[in-house]
Amino acid sequence: MLTDNITRRSDGTLCFAGQSVPELAGRYGTPLYLMDEDRIRANCRMYREAFRAHFGDGALPLYASKAACFKQMYRIVAEEGLGVDCVSVGEIHTALQAGFPAEKIYYHGDGKTDADIAYALAQGVGCFVVDNGNELITLEEEAAARGIRQKILLRITPGIDPHTYQAVNTGAVDVKFGVPVETGQAMEFVRAALSMEHVEVAGLHCHVGSMVFGEDVYQRTIDIMLAFMREVKDELGLELDELNLGGGYGVRYEESDPAIDIPARLGEVAANLKKRTAEYGLRLPRFLMEPGRSIVADAGMTVYTVCSVKRIPGYKSYAIVDGGMADNPRYCLYGSRYTVLHAQRSGGLRAIFDLAGRACESGDIIQPAISLPNNTARGDLVAVCTTGAYNYAMASHYNRLPKPPVVMLHGGESYVAVRRETIEDVCAMDV
Ligand SMILES: *Cc1c(COP(=O)(O)O)cnc(C)c1O
């Protein structure tokens, strides 16, 4: 199986985190998001332990909460001792409602409004990751008005495209996030921040992308960021204390995807960080990263009921389910691949289907050309694997479809972390 929390009993019953998927579907209904809490915790611990081993006690992984954001996630992450990265007032509010400590929140975003900035300051958010000069000026004013000095990181664009990472000076210099090194703007950004009295520049942030598999992407990022930190020290006399390398480690969606040994990769990153700091005569900065997907993706599975099977001779067949782009828009958005499993049987003659949703869009495909038992029929259950990241978080109400619940699996038990929406919920804002 794709991950070791997915198993099948000899009678063909699919199990997730050791529990029968058909039983869970019977109890909670479909469509249904399942989350393996033990896997989330194990992934958090893997990061914590690797950080401690390779970067020392001060180093901290921050869970990028946009990947899966609801109160129970923040409670789990808090218990596991991670910080979080939030990208909106809504995420900060959710974290605080869950009792997450404000000082361990890093507040991101390239389009923070005046109201957003005021809210985050009022809540005592630990650190702003300042994306650009406009935000810096407003933050300085708002912090001054409150008579405080706000800790910040400055978001820098190292100019690495993680998918063609040899090409350092192309594409990724002109992403909408951060301030590029190459154009000289990053240095001006740091200089501007240093001239301000009500922000305290703790260090730098960068994030090169998502689904990163390439071995040397983070190494090249370290090279560029440390070279820039040396320039900052030479030009501005400032030695930066924190370096946040962002998120992005890839996960396996299909059997053919490589498995990344994240602790081993982090060991290599640490070695390069130590090498560069020694070479440049810099202190070892406090090291942060912001994994999202690699903490929650393989902890998730979505279960659907087949509503219709449609065969178009000479063309293709569809298995149409009671969910779709409203609960998982990722194939529609960027052609994401998924492994799809029948939840009740695996043997026998098989056939190729497009797994389609029930939204009124011909593009509402969860995954094309998947293999299911040929006799797959209305009422059968199918499971889409590795849906823990960017599925519930990206769900919409398109076609006024209520959002599915999130059910957590923990130590052989299950509980509702987010209840199923009703059609009344969907109408609740209408006047
Ligand atoms: C999305 C994002 C992350 C998390 O990325 P993953 O691929 O989910 O690990 C971390 N940091 C920033 C700034 C992001 O935008």
Image (spheres, rainbow, N blue to C red):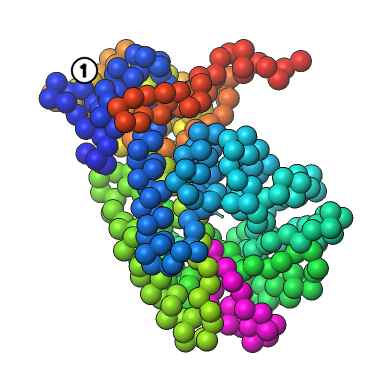
Residue occupied by mark 1: 375
Q: Residues within 10 Å of mark 1 (few under 14, many from 20)?
A: few
At 64% from the left edge and 47% from the top edge, which residue is drawn? 102
Q: Nearer the viewer, residue 209 or 354?
A: 209
The answer to whether 383 appears left or right of 155 in the picture is: left
Q: Nearer the viewer, residue 35 or 101?
A: 101
The answer to whether 253 appears left or right of 79 in the picture is: left
The answer to whether 334 appears left or right of 310 in the picture is: right
Q: For the N terminus, which image quadrant?
A: top left
**Dot 1 lies on which element?**
loop
Q: Amino acid at mark 1?
A: Asn
Helix, strand or loop for the magenta stretch, by majority: helix
Q: Nearer the viewer, residue 28 or 416?
A: 416
With respect to residue 227, does 311 lie above or below? above
Residue lying at the far right in this picture: please name it: 145
Estimate the x, y position of residue 91 in percent, counting from the top left: 62, 40
With respect to residue 273, does 175 lie above or below? above
Estimate the x, y position of residue 281 in percent, counting from the top left: 52, 86
Estimate the x, y position of residue 373 in percent, counting from the top left: 21, 24
Residue range in magenta is: 224-244
At 66% from the left edge and 79% from the top edge, which residue is drawn? 238
* Residue 308 magenta-highlighted: no
Q: Quadrant of residue 7?
A: top left
